[in-house]
Image (spheres, rainbow, N blue to C red):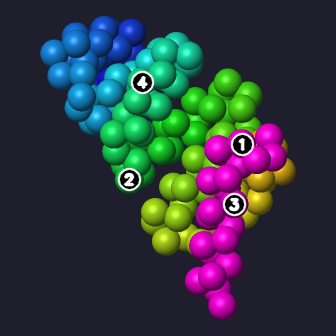
Amino acid sequence: MRNRQFSQAADAYSKAVSMAPDQALILAGQGRALLAAGQNISALQSLKKARDMDFKNINLLNDLALVYAKLENQGMAALITAERFCLTGALKDAQRHAKKAEALLPQGSPPWQRAQDILNANHLKSN
């Protein structure tokens, strides 16, 4: 990755994932390498798996939001960004992105409900 050889890095991470498929950091690294190599669909798959294992990894969430944006899914990009801001304590930024996600995601869907959770949690904290 440091030498900007993203495809080779993605290959190396693929080997590492095959040896340790339940390691969120390795999956996140693979996702970042795939994203840098322009393999957005594969990056999304790796990053989603990593997020399922470690939802508090700020760098992982940043990469996941970026891949959603590259895939033109602005609703999910906004939601993941809102979740990242919540974890860092930037509640006003979290609320702004959650409102954007709420407007873009299908009403009632699980991601929409996550945006609602952020909005409701921020509302309670501001009272």
N-terminal of the pair, mark 2 or mark 3, is 2
Task: Answer left or right for 109 relative to 104.
Answer: left
Residue positioned most to the left: 19
Q: Quadrant of residue 68?
A: top right
Task: Answer left or right for 40 relative to 106.
Answer: left
**Residue 44: x and y, percent?**
52, 25
Residue positioned most to the front: 108
**Residue 103: x and y, percent?**
83, 50
Q: Nearer the viewer, mark 4 or mark 1?
A: 1
What is the three-letter code of the residue carrying label 3? Gln
Asked whether 96 or 114 is in front, the reply is 114
Query: Is residue 32 in view from this perspective?
Result: no
Q: Secondary structure at mark 1?
A: loop
Label 1 sits on residue: 109
Distance from label 4 to label 1 (Cα)?
22 Å
N-terminal of the pair, mark 4 or mark 1, is 4
Q: Report if residue 17 lies within the magenta region.
A: no
Residue name at image x 64 percent, y 49 percent: 79
Distance from label 3 to label 4 (Cα)?
26 Å
What is the three-letter code of the residue carrying label 1? Ser
Label 4 sits on residue: 46
Q: Nearer the viewer, mark 3 or mark 4?
A: 3
Distance from label 2 to label 3 (Cα)?
19 Å
Task: Answer left or right for 23 relative to 82.
Answer: left
Label 3 sits on residue: 116
Q: Quadrant of residue 46?
A: top left
Label 2 sits on residue: 56
